[in-house]
Image (cartoon, coloured by chain):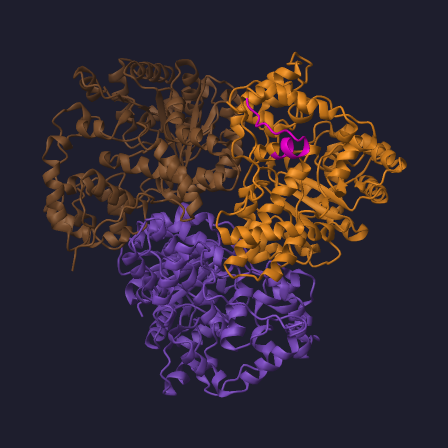
Chain colours: A brown, B orange, C purple
Amino acid sequence: MSTPQWKLSPDRLFDPDPAQRRVARTLYESIRDLPLICPHGHVDPRLLADPEYGFGTPADLLIIPDHYIFRMLYSQGVPMEALGVPRVDGGPVETDHRRIWQTFADHFHLFRGTPTGVWLAAELAEVFGVGAKLTSATAQDIYDEIAAKLATPAFRPRALFERFHIETLCTTDAASDPLAHHQALRASGWKGDVRPTFRPDAVVNLDTPGWGQEIERLSAASGIDITSYSAFIRAVEQRRAFFKQMGATATDHAALSAYTAELSPAEAEAVFKRALQGEASAEDVQRFTGHMMMEMARMSIEDGLVMQFHVGAFRGHNSFVASRFGKDKGADIPVASEFTCNLHPLLNRYGNDTRLTLIVFCLDEATYARELAPLAGHYPAMRLGPPWWFFDSINGMVRYRDLVHETAGLYNTVGFNDDTRAFPSIPARHDVWRRVECNWLAGLVVRGLIDEEDSVEMASASAYGLAKTAYRL
Amino acid sequence: MSTPQWKLSPDRLFDPDPAQRRVARTLYESIRDLPLICPHGHVDPRLLADPEYGFGTPADLLIIPDHYIFRMLYSQGVPMEALGVPRVDGGPVETDHRRIWQTFADHFHLFRGTPTGVWLAAELAEVFGVGAKLTSATAQDIYDEIAAKLATPAFRPRALFERFHIETLCTTDAASDPLAHHQALRASGWKGDVRPTFRPDAVVNLDTPGWGQEIERLSAASGIDITSYSAFIRAVEQRRAFFKQMGATATDHAALSAYTAELSPAEAEAVFKRALQGEASAEDVQRFTGHMMMEMARMSIEDGLVMQFHVGAFRGHNSFVASRFGKDKGADIPVASEFTCNLHPLLNRYGNDTRLTLIVFCLDEATYARELAPLAGHYPAMRLGPPWWFFDSINGMVRYRDLVHETAGLYNTVGFNDDTRAFPSIPARHDVWRRVECNWLAGLVVRGLIDEEDSVEMASASAYGLAKTAYRL
Amino acid sequence: MSTPQWKLSPDRLFDPDPAQRRVARTLYESIRDLPLICPHGHVDPRLLADPEYGFGTPADLLIIPDHYIFRMLYSQGVPMEALGVPRVDGGPVETDHRRIWQTFADHFHLFRGTPTGVWLAAELAEVFGVGAKLTSATAQDIYDEIAAKLATPAFRPRALFERFHIETLCTTDAASDPLAHHQALRASGWKGDVRPTFRPDAVVNLDTPGWGQEIERLSAASGIDITSYSAFIRAVEQRRAFFKQMGATATDHAALSAYTAELSPAEAEAVFKRALQGEASAEDVQRFTGHMMMEMARMSIEDGLVMQFHVGAFRGHNSFVASRFGKDKGADIPVASEFTCNLHPLLNRYGNDTRLTLIVFCLDEATYARELAPLAGHYPAMRLGPPWWFFDSINGMVRYRDLVHETAGLYNTVGFNDDTRAFPSIPARHDVWRRVECNWLAGLVVRGLIDEEDSVEMASASAYGLAKTAYRL
């Protein structure tokens, strides 16, 4: 019996209707080779700072750090230890990476028809040149094939960055981060455009575990002794200036809800003091985050950094997993969100100011057409980010345009973010977006909603121009 | 280079699949020429009362009064002043209508693939006979073309009413409105069927700005001195009778939530007294509106006026825009809605009475399949209105049938409402509905869910019969 | 004029695109003849316990007991009395079953394009061999045709059970049910696999009308005098053991919300005592149900019964209908649901235990992608049930996969449940599921998301294997 092979159709993700498919393919060919703009993601800058950085084994690269993968196997009863996910307490986990890989391959059917399955197939076939489909039988041969590739200079991160045709890649960095890797990268003379993004969640959200230490780190990084709210604000402003000087064009903020509301200076000072004394209440936490979103919008107007706001994840829903394996382990679950009332204070105060760009991301698709598209379709300062996380998927993208476009149009959206930690998956993720967008536009063409001339401009904007403009790159 | 032209395919909005398209086209041809029933909208009756009414310039007609258009340009940083939108304070705005038109044309790409873009293309091409696609380059020629048409008698509102084949058009009128234009229209002997609709929001919602004056107006119009709740009810009943005598067959009510609940007579009296004294609380406001919805259902059972209920818009979300330009300026944003519990009191009291027709409209599509279709698919008195506002769109209509039909069926819905202030857009709006509905039915035919015989009857009901029956026209 | 006939295309419910249709048909042919697994439903076990059970007239079989049907006619003003639905007070209702049938046929157009319409057409054509389409004109002939069939031994329930190729059918039974029909069925020597399901809602939900009597019945059935919470728990455990011994593999629980939270033993005892004294508060009711869900999960881990949880129906929304005709009369309306926070206590305590299978059903599709798929795609104990009730429909199934699959994959779902009281509709319901699933998989194939080899395995799992495995059959 011959080994089954990946079947990556050149027309994949396009509608089967021949007329639509023809238009989709033509559009796709017109934008396929545009450079990648990666304005938001979680690639570790170390990868690119060190010219000799190596990815380790195939399991190190593709399984152990990827919560998209191990959470699916975990949901079907595979212990995370069997996948080599490190325990917080240093307890024993599988260390034989060939066995980890075999377990993964034995369960690869779980990813049939999922975005993770699509990304992995494309990554194995197109980045690593693996012809055989991953199965229990082919697992070890494929392991060898990937391992051999990873040992070559062509699979160092910088070489892949260039091969992937990445024009700009932005990382996500804590407010107190000294950006040493970014400094090293710049000093190295390598020409890749890699930029930090200012993400102050750990100091803004008063309930961050170890918030006090985070404030100490911020004091150290900024050289400002943070003993008051006003000193805190000065320190934040100082770090924003430093990030900007290091090439940042954006900030990023995450919260469970989109709540925004300004505190009086006295209230802000009082809440901050309680937090310093370890006495902040749950209400303090929410009000302070809501207040800081207002402050961040104010600062963005002043310094020109684009403001990103990611709303709606209940982090660490599974206490057992959180305590045993730590955070970001596939147990973050979305909650219903509300934007119309929650963003009202911020948008009323700053939403008419064209110097501000506020890009909102959400995990509650019920708000796309009901709240987010009408808001983005009215306020000059607001833009809507691409489908995020669970919705960074074929259907997620289709629903996004279906629900958003008619009210917000194309130009109040900002193209694509791959948002990934998995560096080699970047081309596959952008390719899914580009294919789905071209197919969507082809659908508009064959239904007579736009003409082909318009569709070509829209495809290019979606694949490249919108992200570049919105992030001021 | 030749000037680009509108490409209005005769098969536009139909699925590209040849089998489905063939059925859709046949269905569409069977209903395309049916008269238009316009049972809910915001056309100013003055247009039709005055036989010589002129629309002004192309900007007067198509841009300055249309919040669908200027909100999109505003969202991309174009000041509303540059589009000639009048300021509340009389401050300066652009008065050169050719420049307004040029600014609009320069940004026409914002509407690519949106319902506004589709309506405008159809309106320019089919109402005004404009062949060239609107671009920066063609703007001034098109302005001339439209202006020339508008100067001719064929472009008086009454002439267009007849050309559009409108069978009945209902306007929306305040409770205290003397309906002078409607009286003039009737007196003129013109045969167009134009009817008022009773919309008492300004007196029912106690937080209406200037509510006291509205009550005075209602006193004057009804000849009843409204110094008590019971007098208020008598005045409302008096006005309903007057509207009915003037041809009205329906009332209309708008509220942020669908809350309904009866107050005792003493409570109602007490709340109303507080309102008269300017002392109504926020809770009073909500409870009184909820109570009045019950009262309106009771009155509808008595006088036979169909009751419309529009739920879910946060009006005037942008304080800056509201204070500078007034209301209805594109800054109304939907909120999540709840119907199952909120309508429970009203439906329990009156929902089994076949004399009542309650037509519900919403801005929260999450309630279509979950709440509204099951309610409309059970209570004899309840019907579901067509997709409203942001959802009066191609995708909005597709989702509406997708989500509503399987539970409520076709006959618990009420056909289409164009709901427009923009008189010349009426045919384009109905045409979108008719095309989308025929395509939906064609999809059912080619999937074997209905046969062609049934589809023909359903298409006709959707385009014409359902609206006529539901609104008792 | 010739009599119109049912047009049941062999390709019905498949996409019209020829490429997709070809794949769908091939997949469907590969699974069409697999036996039916019916792990959740409401068939009365009496039907199968008595070998000579007869269904009565066509109206007895198809109209009078089917709330899907009479609620639609009621919504259009047909009194339920005219359909022979018995009144609680024994008041007069139509007794001429030919007239009932005629009224139904006169309104059959209401079901055009609805799942009920599709099921009925398939049932009449394929179970009863009726060629003519049901209309006012054909009603009486069709009545005769069905009545004649029903009089034959081939239309006894057991004969149909075998003809339908049902492998296993689970009923739904109260905690205190002695399972006499199940005992008779087993004693009869007939080989059909029919199993009870343990549904203790009436004793778990303290606000059940007549809860005290239900507790007395439970005491009697268990032989445990339930005078305390701890005795109650022992009685529940005793009944679970009895059900398991009688073949049950699952329990079932329904609640308005998904709220779960453990009470301390003292609190549980106190709440239960208040309930015994008829003094349970609304808060007690909610907290006790939430607590019992935790207890049921604990018991399922101990005894291995699969736990089903049906969330989100506001039962008996129409008081008039409830008081005149009783419960389950088409007036149950869904409400918005929340799972991320509500299931947090249960999943944190038991969700990592692979001995538990918790299958969740919901009536709020907004939670599919936002909450349920992420939860099922992470917790080993959780699975997602198929689309339920209003969503057991063509579009409901399409949306289910569209919203769930990319995050949860196929293997965290559990195949199909027909959930029906209408025994002869079982094949039609499974057939809709199988067709829609094959068409969905064909869509993945023609878009290059999966290959045909994978699609064949997935189709079989969806039609048969997943249900069998999830319910431990």
Asked if residue A23 lies in the magenta stretch, the reply is no
Q: Is A238 drawn above or below residue B223 in the view shown?
A: above
Task: Tell which of C374 and B188 is nearer to you.
Answer: B188
What residue appears at the point 69 percent right and 26 percent down from the top-left corner? B61
In this orientation, does residue B224 appear? no
Quadrant of the image occupied by residue C263: bottom left
Quadrant of the image occupied by residue C114: bottom right
Task: Tell which of B44 and A176 is nearer to you.
Answer: B44
Task: Tell which of B431 and B394 is nearer to you.
Answer: B431
What residue appears at the point 62 percent right and 46 percent down from the top-left corner? B434
Q: Is C292 drawn above or below residue B182 in the view shown?
A: below
Q: From the image, which quarter does the N terminus of chain A lie in? A: bottom left
Residue at far top of view: B92
- Relative to residue B345, is residue A301 drawn left or right? left
Task: Tell which of C267 and A412 is nearer to you.
Answer: A412
Q: From the image, which quarter does the C terminus of chain A lie in? A: top left
In this orientation, does residue B294 appear? yes
Asked if residue B130 lies in the magenta stretch, the reply is yes
Q: Is B200 drawn above or below residue A216 in the view shown?
A: below
Rendered location of residue C437, percent (x, y): 40, 59
What residue appears at the point 35 percent right and 22 percent down from the top-left corner? A250
The total number of labels drawn is 0
Q: What stretch is highlighted in magenta?
A: B122-135
Rendered location of residue C213, percent (x, y): 51, 71
Rendered location of residue A174, percent (x, y): 28, 25
Residue at far front of view: B1
Rendered location of residue A131, percent (x, y): 18, 46
